[in-house]
Amino acid sequence: MSSKKINIAVIGATGYVGLDLIKILSNHPKVNIKYLCAQKNIGKNIQFFDKRIKKKLPRITKIKNVNWHRIEILFTSLPTGYSQVYLLTLPSIFL
């Protein structure tokens, strides 16, 4: 059994769905959360939005700051139709 962790990013990290997803992923032994992305509240800790999340995680950042070469899985928790828009802007190495 491999002990390698999967590097992930979450876009839409501060919404209801994003926060629940982060809470679940932060407790998973095979997940390494590298980026939490949002359009607002850049630089804040995720615990500002959800006190249930106890693990120390990266601060909220803009999508343009993600190093896509370090990400293996991208989770999106955006309003309907927005995920498709963001996916079109990703570098081809991720698609």
Image (cartoon, rainbow, N blue to C red):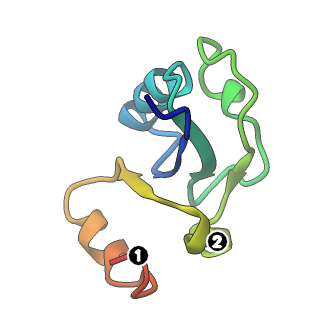
- Residue 25 in the image: state x and y as whole percent: 47, 29
Mark 1–mark 2 Cα distance, whole angstroms, equals: 10 Å
Residue type (three-letter) at the residue carrying disc 1: Phe
Q: Residues within 10 Å of mark 2 (few under 14, many from 20)?
A: few
The residue sitting at 57% across, 60% down in the picture is 39
The residue sitting at 55% across, 72% down in the picture is 68
Q: Residues within 10 Å of mark 1 (few under 14, many from 20)?
A: few
Q: Residue furthest top?
A: 52
Is 16 drawn above or below residue 74 in the view shown? above
Q: Quadrant of residue 18?
A: top left
- Residue 13 in the image: state x and y as whole percent: 51, 43
Mark found first going from the N terminus, 1 or 2: 2
Q: Determine the secondary structure under disc 2.
A: loop
Specify the quadrant that holds the C terminus. Answer: bottom left
Proximity of marks 1 and 2: CB atoms separated by less than 8 Å: no
- Residue 26 in the image: state x and y as whole percent: 56, 26
Provide the residue designation for mark 2: 67
Q: Determine the secondary structure under disc 1.
A: loop
Provide the residue designation for mark 1: 94
- Using the image, tell me which numbered label, if any, was put on residue 6: none
Is 89 drawn above or below residue 9 in the view shown? below
Is 73 drawn above or below residue 22 in the view shown? below
Specify the quadrant that holds the N terminus. Answer: top left
Q: Residue furthest left?
A: 80
- Horizontal side of 71 relative to 92 (left or right) equals right
The residue sitting at 74% across, 45% down in the picture is 59
The residue sitting at 35% across, 47% down in the picture is 77
Residue type (three-letter) at the residue carrying disc 2: Asn
| Nearer to me, 5 or 38 | 5
